[in-house]
Image (cartoon, rainbow, N blue to C red):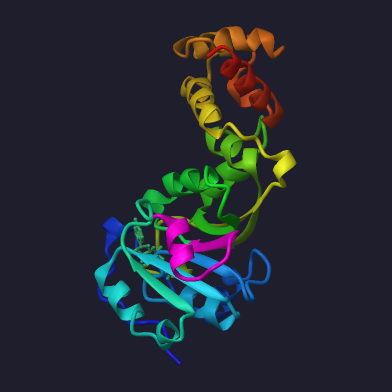
Amino acid sequence: MSTPLTPGPAKKSLGQHFLFDPSILSRVANAGGSVKGKTVIEVGPGPGGLTRALLDSGVGKLIAIELDDRFAEGLSLWPEVREGRLHVHHGDALAANIPELIAAAGGASPAMIVANLPYNVATPMLVEWLKAPAWRGTMVLMFQKEVALRICAAADEDHYGRLAVLSQAVTRPRLAITLPPGAFRPPPKVDSTVVVLDPLPDHERFNDLAGMETVTAAAFGQRRKMLRAALKTLPGAVDALTTSGIDPTRRAETLTQQDFRALTAAWRATR
Ligand code: SAM
């Protein structure tokens, strides 16, 4: 059986902080429920600790996307590649055509995503995946703890902002496992937290995520201002406050998920 590869020096530019403790890795692999028989995308397998845990937990097809040549090459030698259970894609996960990778691997949709993400690109990756309903199932993602809190926060809470509104428009996120810096090699500066994001059923999803991105960018761009001032930068948005029945003297951080849905729909109707 192949074991995690011995890494060379970690590359800071690629956000490399590795996990090697099998009990932690098994908890992360299964934090979103059983992966048995499922198709799973792992972004940034690195030396393969989480990859090993996923394979040992019975994943059906594992598609591992890695940018660092050393790890992509090492992982392609694992026996599970020959057996057709592990598919290594050498490249940038942000540029990868994931539906194509799933089809090429003979995998099934929806596919789970399980990853200890490179922190420098974790947020853009999440936002990209939130917009991709056709193939995406439950996501189990490790972030800096502060980012995890931002994903799960509710209106009026300290960490509430764009990331919470967008994440909760299409998923139900929850904090699952928090790890101290010492759990990683090399250790990062801050705690890390696994967030599990279960997709909302179709009838509960908000379908205009692009519109919500635009509206939340304007609303939270000047979060301390009243909405009637903050939204002036976005044509149609101040009128949309009135049509959606939202008091224009409120601040963005007080608007709930339902408020942002109503505001986005009203703004879209002005376009
Ligand atoms: N999964 C491993 C673990 O838990 O030990 C490694 C996690 S490490 C935090 C992040 C990994 O993502 C690194 O292996 C890094 O090379 C890879 N990576 C960074 N940017 C990437 C990108 N844009 N696309 C794919 N992989 C990337």
- Looking at the rendered structure, the number of numbered marks drawn on it comes to 0
Q: Quadrant of the N terminus?
A: bottom left
Magenta residues?
97-115
User: Which residue is nearer to you in this view: 270 or 166?
Assistant: 270
**Vertical relation: 164 (above or below) 236:** below
Query: Residue 252: image x %, image y %?
Result: 59, 22
Question: Residue drawn at (58%, 79%), measured in percent from left and top?
Answer: 23
* Residue 66: quarter of image: bottom left
Q: Is residue 243 left or right of residue 145?
A: right
The answer to whether residue 235 is visible is: yes
Query: Residue 221: image x %, image y %?
Result: 46, 23
Question: Residue drawn at (62%, 35%), measured in percent from left and top?
Answer: 207
Q: Is residue 255 left or right of residue 114?
A: right
Query: Residue 75: image x %, image y %?
Result: 36, 79
* Residue 104: quarter of image: bottom left
Query: Residue 208: image x %, image y %?
Result: 58, 31
Q: Is residue 1 magenta?
A: no
Q: Is residue 113 magenta?
A: yes
**Vertical relation: 139 (above or below) 236:** below
The answer to whether residue 226 is visible is: no
User: Which residue is nearer to you in this view: 244 or 152?
Assistant: 244
Question: Residue drawn at (33%, 84%), measured in percent from left and top?
Answer: 77
Question: Residue drawn at (32%, 57%), measured in percent from left and top?
Answer: 92
* Image region (quadrant) for ligand 1: bottom left
